[in-house]
Image (cartoon, rainbow, N blue to C red):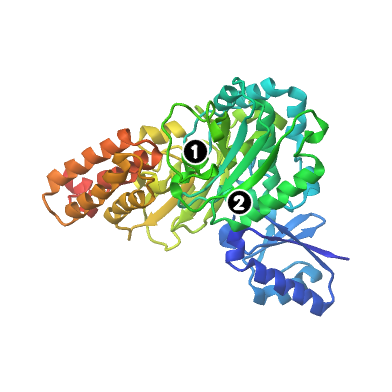
């Protein structure tokens, strides 16, 4: 009898010792003369339990974690002898943190071997493509539009509208580009998909190519993601061998091929037009719009650009139908959102759920509060350019419009938690510093405004003519917000003004409570 184990090859699991645990278990098996098959999967996203080892049993998988190399000998003995061990977490699917989720996009992550197309197919993979081929281009676009899917990269633009625009344009060449330049702090969902279920991204891009008439695609991955790049390269090669890519996709008349391109580390290349410049071999700089990429994008041709989570959501929409996907969520925020909990949080990781859960539920219930045990003071949602929300706003539903109504943004779904030791004036200054460092330099509000912003914040903190400098900072933020070419300069005011408004005492002003008294 062979003992079948599952251990993540996800970069975060590797960072905390997954490779060493795997080697230790193999060595222990050799010493104990036990036949062991180890399947390297993606992560389930319960990062405080990594490295997590799952064992296949007649009743399903049973999880153990976090496992250290020193645990290998005892763990192996326990698995052979009946399964009891101090690190036993129980049936994986019954772990409360995982059981509470609604996993649509991440349904296979941590479950399948990401290098095996057969495993992908065995877990309902490629069914969306089968239906897409039966429907045809126009019906695919309408199905995606009906689903209510909005861009998961941050802008939240309706995916169906973008695809319809590109489909209606006649051109000898069209492109599909996946933005995998996941540069926001506290975000890792794109990486998890590419490392744990890369075929779902390929399938989503193939469906998009059929919908709009594109024949070539690119996945633009940040250089800091070598494991993701390797996983995507392996999956693309397997897809070519099986006929999912090439001159006759799945035996149809449609042709599409794709390749990986690795960026050089510029945050601004997460902006779609800067990304296109980088793909063309140029310095990444923001383009003036119009023309939109759907009209004139990569190499001047019509181009559909979506992020990883957007493309990865498409296969289930085509498989189960747009109406099925639209049933999840609230308002105009439909479907599920893979929310990434990070920072000073006890239970950090990926939590996929329908739109509508409140910020407070995410931080205090799902995330179990701070890792330090101190009170939560601020939560930044939407990356380094997201607003800081105090506890008084914890009733905000996780929804595009609800956050916008409170001068925030959900961005790529990153949630970073800070306890009561954080200095919010320093956080505000960091936003300006980050913008100055990462600016492409093309527009004045971003290039100059961010540097002046650091100087003004420094003067406020030093107590120099505080009222006048605070008014100047507000005016500067207004100029950056409405005058910048892209979201880098346009969104930098969100963390600055939220810190200033909700935490004035860190800037030397009376707190709201003191002001009320």
Tell me if 478 is positioned left or right of 311 in this view.
Answer: left
Q: Quadrant of residue 103?
A: top right
Residue 102 visible (yes or no): no
- Quadrant where the image shows the C terminus: top left
Residue under the point 17% across and 53% down: 459
**Residue 329 picture location, percent across and down:** 55, 32
Tell me if 18 is positioned left or right of 135 in this view.
Answer: left
Which residue position holds label 2?
Answer: 192
Residue under the point 75% across and 76% down: 27
Q: Give the mark nearest the N terminus, 2 or 1.
A: 2
Element under disc 2: helix
**Residue 389 picture location, percent across and down:** 36, 45
- Labelled disc at residue 272: 1
Between the C-alphas of marks 2 and 1, the distance is: 21 Å
- As drawn, the residue found furthest toward the bottom would be 31
Element under disc 1: helix
């Amino acid at each position: 009898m062979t003992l079948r184990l599952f251990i993540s090859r996800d970069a975060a699991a590797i960072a905390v010792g997954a490779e060493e645990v795997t080697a230790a278990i193999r060595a222990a098996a050799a010493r104990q003369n036990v036949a062991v098959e180890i399947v390297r999967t993606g992560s389930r996203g319960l990062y405080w339990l990594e490295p997590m080892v799952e064992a296949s049993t007649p009743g399903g998988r049973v999880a153990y974690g976090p496992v250290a190399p020193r645990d290998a000998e005892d763990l192996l003995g326990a698995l052979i002898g009946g399964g009891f061990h101090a690190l036993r977490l129980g049936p994986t699917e019954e772990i409360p943190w995982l059981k509470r989720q609604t996993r649509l996009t991440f349904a296979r992550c941590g479950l399948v071997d990401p290098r095996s197309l057969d495993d992908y197919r065995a877990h309902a993979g490629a069914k969306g493509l089968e239906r897409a081929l039966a429907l045809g281009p126009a019906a695919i676009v309408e199905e995606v539009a009906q689903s209510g899917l909005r861009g998961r990269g941050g802008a939240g633009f309706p995916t169906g509208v973008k695809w319809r625009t590109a489909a209606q344009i006649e051109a000898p060449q069209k492109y599909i580009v996946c933005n995998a330049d996941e540069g926001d702090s506290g975000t890792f969902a794109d990486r998890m998909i590419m490392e744990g279920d890369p075929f779902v991204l390929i399938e989503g891009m193939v469906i998009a190519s059929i919908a709009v008439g594109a024949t070539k695609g690119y996945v633009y991955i940040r250089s800091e993601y070598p494991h993701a790049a390797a996983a995507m390269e392996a999956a693309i090669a397997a897809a070519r061998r099986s006929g999912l890519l090439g001159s006759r996709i799945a035996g149809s008349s449609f042709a599409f091929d794709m390749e990986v391109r690795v960026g050089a580390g510029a945050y601004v290349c997460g902006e779609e037009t800067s990304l296109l410049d980088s793909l063309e071999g140029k310095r990444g700089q923001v383009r003036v719009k119009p023309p939109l990429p759907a009209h004139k994008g990569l190499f001047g041709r019509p181009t559909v650009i979506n992020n990883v989570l957007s493309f990865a959501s498409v296969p289930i929409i085509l498989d189960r139908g747009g109406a099925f996907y639209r049933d999840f969520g609230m308002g105009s925020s439909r479907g599920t959102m893979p929310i990434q909990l990070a920072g000073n949080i006890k239970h950090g990781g990926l939590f996929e759920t329908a739109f509508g859960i409140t910020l407070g539920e995410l931080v205090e219930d799902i995330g179990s509060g701070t890792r330090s045990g101190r009170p939560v003071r601020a939560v930044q949602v939407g990356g380094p350019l997201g607003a800081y929300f105090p506890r008084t706003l914890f009733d905000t539903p996780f929804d595009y419009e609800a956050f916008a109504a409170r001068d925030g943004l959900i961005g790529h779904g990153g949630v970073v938690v800070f306890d009561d030791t954080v200095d919010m004036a320093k956080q505000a200054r960091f936003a300006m510093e980050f913008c100055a460092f990462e600016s492409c330099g093309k527009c004045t509000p971003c290039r100059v405004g961010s540097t002046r912003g650091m100087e003004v914040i420094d003067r406020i903190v030093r107590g120099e003519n505080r009222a006048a400098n605070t008014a100047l900072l507000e005016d500067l933020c207004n100029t950056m917000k409405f005058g910048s070419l892209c979201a880098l300069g346009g969104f930098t005011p969100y963390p600055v003004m939220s810190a200033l408004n909700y935490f004035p005492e860190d800037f030397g002003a009376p707190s709201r409570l003191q002001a009320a008294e």
